[in-house]
Image (cartoon, rainbow, N blue to C red):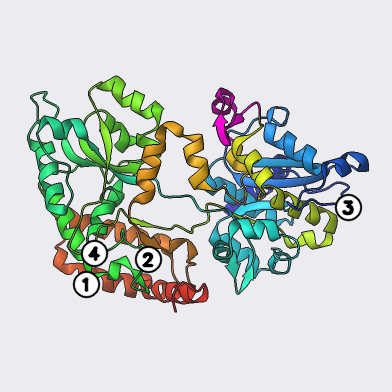
């Protein structure tokens, strides 16, 4: 009973906190009479109407957004659309989702809210969300065309559209390797699994840094992501990944290449060619060890290895260090950097069903979503204010120093996304060669972002068990010959077959397979 009272008190305090922090969706609203082709109201009409701005509240996970008076994007959108856009962020997705659930349980909804797929499905099933299906062609055409039909399907529940699906991020990853170590040991860039093994062995045993000590490893990384391109060489994805292969849905645990990949990785670990801390590394620990010269190969994104500030960081430690990108090794079943979910919405945004009773506000929200999806509006939320954050020179966007200082939060306003192939080289011109390299690498097509756990399946428990048993296989705590028994336990004790069957059903529902 005491615990229940404490929980109730906590929930009440959280409700008061979130209500104060996130704000209510109230106020006098009115719809603009005229709209431009982009979905935004005409500027001259906004000025002459002299109507009270419509307050639109947005809640999402994040941090680092400036105060309203210093927010260039808010000011521009408010003026253009005659709105008062109030965007509140809570750092840490778990904390954010906990507060959103408390708030929605009390019927106090943000006008636009960031959700994960499981919560989106739950809220939709409970009738809490606005069905966007009837509005896509009549009211959200610009946003719909910008996001694309295929991506919008990722926000479907029972055949209806419930989410604004932010355009997917592009792939950033690859193996990175110490070119100066290869040169010192007179080794060629590895191109297949045998080459990779030999280089890792040399990096561990042949003093690649020339300090006279045996204090280096071939690989470092974080958990089994360390070996993503090795799984790819065996034609499969990381453990537990669901992907498409030969027109079929495949779960990597059932792929024949999985056991062979584990055997190869087990050999690397048993010969001490891998940083012994990979299963406990968190955050930037693996990168820090790589920069400190503890290992010569790491699987990472150019965002963590190739940016100017990180190059300066490792050059400060060792001016001779030279980290370069390396393609995935060729193996018996393929050559893939990883399995990448190319159509995974980077965020899902939903609108509450209560907006049906506020048609003027709903119209304004549609105008906002259309505008940030138009050429003019999308440029604003990508690059900021022309003349301050960027200039146009010979038809190209050229960023100013102010963009680097003031533009780190602009992405929060890209609720429908951005054309990454254009944006990334513009935002990171010095890193363009790294961006292009990563974009060209072959990858399997993951569909994990589409999947919902079926009733009776606990993903957290299954994942925990799988992680523990795979570590036993790799570190000689359990013979690899028992892999079939591992699968049987996944199915019998954790109902994993239910998840696999649900994945196949979902893939057919979305038209990913026949």
The residue tagged 3 is: 33
Camera-nearest label, 3 or 4: 3
Residue shown at 16%/64% (left/top)? 480
In x, y percent, where is residue 179? Answer: 20, 34
Does residue 14 appear anywhere in the picture? Answer: no
The residue tagged 2 is: 243
Q: Which of the two labelled residues, at mark 2 and mark 1, occupies the earlier sequence position?
A: 2
The residue tagged 4 is: 258
Q: Which of the two labelled residues, at mark 1 and mark 3, occupies the earlier sequence position?
A: 3
Of 331 and 220, the residue lying toward us: 331
Camera-nearest label, 2 or 4: 2
Q: Which of the two labelled residues, at mark 3 and mark 4, occupies the earlier sequence position?
A: 3
Q: How many marks?
A: 4
Could you give the CA–CA distance between mark 1 and mark 3, rounded to whole angstroms? Answer: 65 Å
Q: Which mark is residue 495?
A: none
User: Within the magenta stretch, is there residue 389?
Assistant: yes
Q: Which residues are magenta?
A: 387-409
* Quadrant showing the C terminus: bottom left
Camera-nearest label, 2 or 1: 2
């Amino acid at each position: 009973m005491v615990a229940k009272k404490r929980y109730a008190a906590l929930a009440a305090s959280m409700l008061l906190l979130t209500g104060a922090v996130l704000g209510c969706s109230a106020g006098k609203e009115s719809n603009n009479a005229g709209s431009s082709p982009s979905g935004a109201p005409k500027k001259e009409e906004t000025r002459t109407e002299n109507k009270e701005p419509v307050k639109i509240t947005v809640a999402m996970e994040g941090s680092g957004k400036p105060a309203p008076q210093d927010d260039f994007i808010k000011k521009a959108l408010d003026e253009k659309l005659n709105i008062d856009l109030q965007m509140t962020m809570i750092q840490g997705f778990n904390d954010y989702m906990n507060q959103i659930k408390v708030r929605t349980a009390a019927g106090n909804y943000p006008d636009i809210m960031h959700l994960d797929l499981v919560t989106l499905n739950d809220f939709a099933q409970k009738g809490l969300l606005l069905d966007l299906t009837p509005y896509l062609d009549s009211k959200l055409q610009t946003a719909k065309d910008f996001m694309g039909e295929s991506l919008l399907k990722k926000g479907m529940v029972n055949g209806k559209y419930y989410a604004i699906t932010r355009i997917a991020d592009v792939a950033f990853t690859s193996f990175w390797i110490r070119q100066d170590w290869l040169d010192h040991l007179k080794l060629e860039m590895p191109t297949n699994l045998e080459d990779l093994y030999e280089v890792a062995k040399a990096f561990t045993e042949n003093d690649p840094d020339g300090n006279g000590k045996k204090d280096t490893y071939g690989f470092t990384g974080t958990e089994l992501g360390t070996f993503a391109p090795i799984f790819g060489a065996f034609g499969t994805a990381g453990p537990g990944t669901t992907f498409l292969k030969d027109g079929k849905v495949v779960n990597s645990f059932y792929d024949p290449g999985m056991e062979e990949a584990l055997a190869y990785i087990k050999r690397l670990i048993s010969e001490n060619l891998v940083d012994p801390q990979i299963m406990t590394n968190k955050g930037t620990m693996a990168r820090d060890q790589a920069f400190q010269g503890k290992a010569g190969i790491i699987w990472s994104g150019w965002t963590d290895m190739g940016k100017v500030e990180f190059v300066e960081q490792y050059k400060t430690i060792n001016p001779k260090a030279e980290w370069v990108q390396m393609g995935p090794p060729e193996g018996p079943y393929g050559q893939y950097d990883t399995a990448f979910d190319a159509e995974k919405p980077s965020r899902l945004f939903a609108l509450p069903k209560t907006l049906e009773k506020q048609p003027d506000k709903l119209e304004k929200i549609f105008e906002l979503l259309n505008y940030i999806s138009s050429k003019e509006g999308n440029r604003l939320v990508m690059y900021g204010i022309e003349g301050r954050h960027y200039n146009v020179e010979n038809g190209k966007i050229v960023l100013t120093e102010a963009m680097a200082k003031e533009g780190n939060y602009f992405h929060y306003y890209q609720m429908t996304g951005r054309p990454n192939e254009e944006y990334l080289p513009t935002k990171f011109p010095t890193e363009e060669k790294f961006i292009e390299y990563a974009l060209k690498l072959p990858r399997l097509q993951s569909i994990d972002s589409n999947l919902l756990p079926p009733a009776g399946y606990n993903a957290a428990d299954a994942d925990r068990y799988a992680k523990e048993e795979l570590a036993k296989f790799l570190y000689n705590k359990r013979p690899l010959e028992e892999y079939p028994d591992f699968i049987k336990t996944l199915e019998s004790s954790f109902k994993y077959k239910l998840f696999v069957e649900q994945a196949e059903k979902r893939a057919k529902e979305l038209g990913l397979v026949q």
